Image (tube, rainbow, N blue to C red):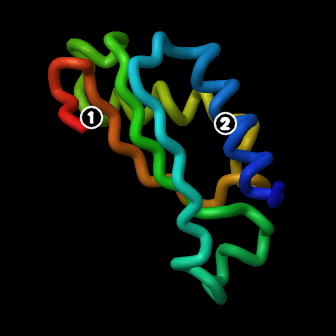
Amino acid sequence: MSINQKRIALFEQDLQKAFELKHLLIEDESHLHAGHAGSATGGGHFKVTIVSPEFAGLNLVARHRAIYKALNTHFPHEIHALTILAHTPDEFWP
């Protein structure tokens, strides 16, 4: 198991604690940013697709803040950059 696969498992645990998850996909996009100056910290680039009823009534900024709060212990050492797609169950069509 790679270091980023281990990191993803930890991210999943933290998001499961914070939200009632209907869908969660965390993708390692670090390979797309090889040589990027920010990657020198060792943190990876990840994309999170998350579906939770807790996002109902929250605007995009509030949803992102909630996710950053759930993952706050992982910045900047494990996560250098994070792309977030946050939806309610009604908004999500896989």
Q: Residue 7 shows which numbered tag?
A: none
Reply above or below: 57 against 41. above
Secondary element type, mark 1: helix
Q: Amino acid at mark 2?
A: Phe
Q: Quadrant of the C terminus?
A: top left
Tell me if mark 1 has few (under 14), some (14-19) or many (20+) residues whose alpha carbon lies within 10 angstroms of its own.
Answer: few
Residue 40 placement (x, y as % from top left): 77, 77
Residue drawn at point x = 60 percent, y = 70 percent: 30
* Alpha carbon distance from label 2 to label 1: 20 Å
Residue drawn at point x = 21 percent, y = 13 percent: 57
Of 75 and 84, the residue lying toward us: 84
Residue 45 placement (x, y as % from top left): 58, 63
Question: Is 43 placed left or right of 46 in the picture?
Answer: right
Question: Is 83 placed left or right of 31 in the picture?
Answer: left
Residue 69 placement (x, y as % from top left): 58, 28
Q: Which residue is mark 1?
A: 60
Question: Is 70 placed left or right of 52 in the picture?
Answer: right
Q: Amino acid at mark 1?
A: Leu
Secondary element type, mark 2: helix
Reply above or below: 78 against 93. below
Of 65 and 18, the residue lying toward us: 18
- Give the number of callouts: 2
Which of the marked residues, 2 or 1, is nearer the chain's N terminus? 2
Res 55 → quadrant: top left
Residue drawn at point x = 39 percent, y = 18 percent: 22
Reply above or below: 36 against 8. below
Instruction: State yes or no: discs 2 and 1 in contact (Cβ < 8 Å).
Output: no
Res 63 → quadrant: top left
Reply above or below: 77 against 22. below
Q: Which residue is mark 2?
A: 11
